[in-house]
Image (tube, coloured by chain):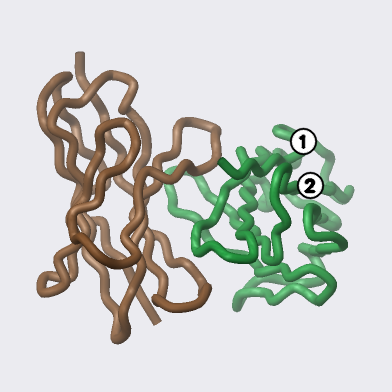
Chain colours: A green, B brown
């Protein structure tokens, strides 16, 4: 099956710093990738949709200048949390779909803790 | 737009007993439906999906779900649960025909009791 990886799996950073999270499709080309945020005991909240070679589409209420998304290739999308604050602490999950599938393949998630 | 409701936030069940996790959806167009499982601190894994055809869908780990259009439901069932089934289960819906945004339910925590 299709595999999506995320790096790092866990990261702790200080308030005010920036953190980059990578999402890679390992064995397929992902035309579209998605970034989700999951709060404790809550469902997944879609943050943005990322298409290769174009600007990401952000959901209402998500600050595009704070959560920078780059989808530079068909196998890599990155999410950069800029000037992180403790309230940005969360579990971030990416997913990807290929060119002919309706199914999303999810990465294992990244636990971000901002101190 | 689509929405999905998982009425049960937690479902405790004894090991080897059957279980049903409920999911209802709302949509003005045809839909695709999914069930995902999430183990602690992990991403989501697809259990099964309904795109078209037979309304009874069989998935991995012995799970199955039945699409009921008249009741707008897609309940997940397993005849005999194991300790390893303890996890969070998410129902999800998207408009059919071409990829569109997926909407997730709030999740149901299945707690299997030894």
Q: Quadrant of residue B104?
A: bottom left
In the depicted view, which residue is nearer to us: A90 or A104?
Answer: A104
Which mark identifies residue A114?
none
Q: Quadrant of residue B63?
A: top left
In the depicted view, which residue is nearer to us: B60 or A37?
Answer: B60
Residue designated by label 2: A21
The percent coordinates of residue B13 (x first, y second) are 15, 28
Q: What residue appears at the point 87 percent right and 62 percent down from the top-left corner?
A: A72
Q: Residues within 10 Å of mark 1 (few under 14, many from 20)?
A: some
Q: CA distance from mark 1 to mark 2?
A: 6 Å
Left or right of residue B9, residue A28 in this image: right
SS category of the residue bearing label 2 = strand
**Both on one chain, marks 1 and 2?**
yes
SS category of the residue bearing label 1 = loop
Left or right of residue B65, residue A50 in this image: right
In this picture, is B70 found above or below B56? below
Q: Residues within 10 Å of mark 2 (few under 14, many from 20)?
A: many
Residue sitting at the far top? B114
In the depicted view, which residue is nearer to us: A32 or A49?
Answer: A32
Q: What residue appears at the point 64 percent right and 48 percent down from the top-left corner?
A: A92
Whether the residues at callouts 1 and 2 have beta carbons within 8 Å, the answer is: yes
In this picture, is B23 found above or below A4? below
In this picture, is B72 found above or below A87? below
The percent coordinates of residue A81 (x first, y second) are 80, 55
The percent coordinates of residue A78 (x first, y second) are 80, 55
Left or right of residue A112, residue B5 in this image: left
- Quadrant showing the N terminus of chain B: bottom left
Q: What residue appears at the point 37 percent right and 39 percent down from the top-left corner?
A: B88
Chain on which label 1 sits: A
Residue designated by label 1: A8
Chain on which label 2 sits: A
């Amino acid at each position: 099956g299709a595999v999506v990886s995320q790096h790092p799996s866990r990261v702790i950073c200080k308030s005010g710093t920036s953190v980059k999270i990578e999402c890679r499709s390992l064995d397929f080309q992902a035309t579209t990738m998605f970034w989700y945020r999951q709060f404790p005991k809550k469902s997944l909240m879609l943050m943005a949709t990322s298409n290769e070679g174009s600007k990401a589409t952000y959901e209402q209420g998500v600050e595009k200048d704070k959560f920078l998304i780059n989808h530079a290739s068909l196998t890599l999308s990155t999410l950069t949390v800029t000037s992180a604050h403790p309230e940005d602490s969360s579990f971030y999950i990416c997913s990807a779909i290929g060119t002919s599938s309706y199914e999303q393949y999810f990465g294992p998630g990244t636990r971000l803790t901002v101190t | 737009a689509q929405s999905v409701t998982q009425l049960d936030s937690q479902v405790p069940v004894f090991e080897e007993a059957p279980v049903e996790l409920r999911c209802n959806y709302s949509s003005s167009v045809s839909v695709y439906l999914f069930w995902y499982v999430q183990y602690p601190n992990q991403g989501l894994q697809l259990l099964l999906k309904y795109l078209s055809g037979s309304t009874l869908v069989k998935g991995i780990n012995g799970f199955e779900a039945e699409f009921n259009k008249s009741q707008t439901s897609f309940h997940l069932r397993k005849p005999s649960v194991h300790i390893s089934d303890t996890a969070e289960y998410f129902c999800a819906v998207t408009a059919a025909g071409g990829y569109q945004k997926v909407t997730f339910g709030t999740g149901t925590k299945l707690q299997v009791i030894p």
